[in-house]
Amino acid sequence: MTRKISHSLINGRTGAGTAGQGLKVEWDSTNDGELHWMDVDESSLEYVAPVFQGSNYGFTAGGSVSDTIDKYAFSSNTTATDHGDLAISINEQAGCSSSDSGFTAGGYTGSTTDVINKFSFTSNTTASDHGDLSVVKYISSGQSSSTQGFASGGNTGSATTAIDKFAFSSNTTASDHGDLSAARQRSAGQSGTDYGFTSGGGGSSNVIDRFAFSSNTTASDWGDLAETVSSDQAGCSSSTHGFDSGGEQGGGYSNRINKFSFTSNVTASDHGDLAISRGFRAGTSETDYGFTAGGWYPLINNVDKFAYSSNTTATDHGDLSVSRSSASGSQY
């Protein structure tokens, strides 16, 4: 897990570790100017990626009322492999990521559910039940802090403002974590270091909401997307920006990628296009690239890859093992 220290500790004592280890500090100019530290041998200082970004694999779970968990490498565009199964077949669920496990929250199984699934990133065994949301809902957006998952908005019979919070470490029932600024469903979710973001959706909205991971106060308006999107976009997160891509728009499906800052609430900018216009895609986040997988209409198995640093058109990055839509994304 990434831990941050203040400038005042740079010149502090260096013998904090054991067996010759000390307090190691690295300045990361690309991650909001934060200082990151870990107790390591002096010769092996390294930056630790935040939980909401992966460096190895993306996972696409469920979708099209399926229980399949697909795993694909960020480094190569080969076809994804089967990585076990969810405890139940599900779609339209929120996806979250801890440092070692993926989670799906709520969704539709033939009827709406409150179940939270947990699966290991390192072994392809069947997922386990990880407690329940505080309410039965689907089409929520997922966000992840270092210790907790969030399912914001969604539909409980009608669109809701509720944000649910659950611990990665225990399978107790989720708790209420405040509300979005307006009832929203089929939105995209993004995660910063201290805040979760919910963008677009809600039937027809360009609003970006921001809520604090540390307190359950009502979310605040955090600027707007560059255009109004009806629903079903994919969300990705770099260390400094959120990305909202694809989705339903004007009776068809869009290929546009929107980019917005985590540190200022100005209107999002156009960030190039997906390779294919689709909605209902699953977003995953690597340290330098965003990925979107599957989608509708028609149903596809395509995985798109786009750079955070440039607004060029996304490239094809292989395929899922089966075509699907309305899945959830996690990363490791």
Image (cartoon, helix red, strand yellow):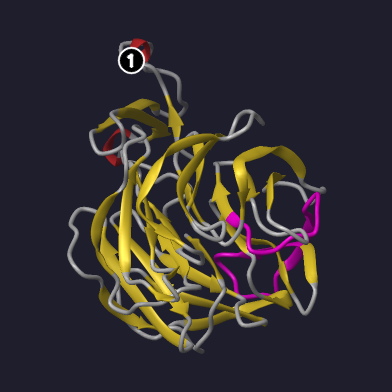
Residue 178 part of the magenta segment: no
Q: Is residue 55 visible?
A: no
Q: Where is residue 269 in the image (x, y as percent from the top left)?
A: 26, 50
Q: Is residue 239 above or below residue 289?
A: above
Q: Position of residue 122 (x, y in %)?
A: 55, 66
The residue that label 1 is drawn on is 7
* Furthest residue in direction front, as rendered: 250
The residue located at (57%, 73%) in the rendering is 327
Residue type at mark 1 is His
Q: Position of residue 175 (x, y in %)?
A: 77, 41
Task: Tell me where the magenta segment starts and ends, as one range.
Answer: 115-141
Q: Is mark 1 on a helix, strand or loop?
A: helix
The answer to which image quadrant residue 20 occupies is top left
Left or right, residue 229 beside residue 136: left
The residue located at (40%, 18%) in the rendering is 15
The residue located at (40%, 29%) in the rendering is 21
The answer to which image quadrant residue 127 occupies is bottom right
Are there few (<14), some (14-19), or many (20+) residues within 10 Å of tag 1? few
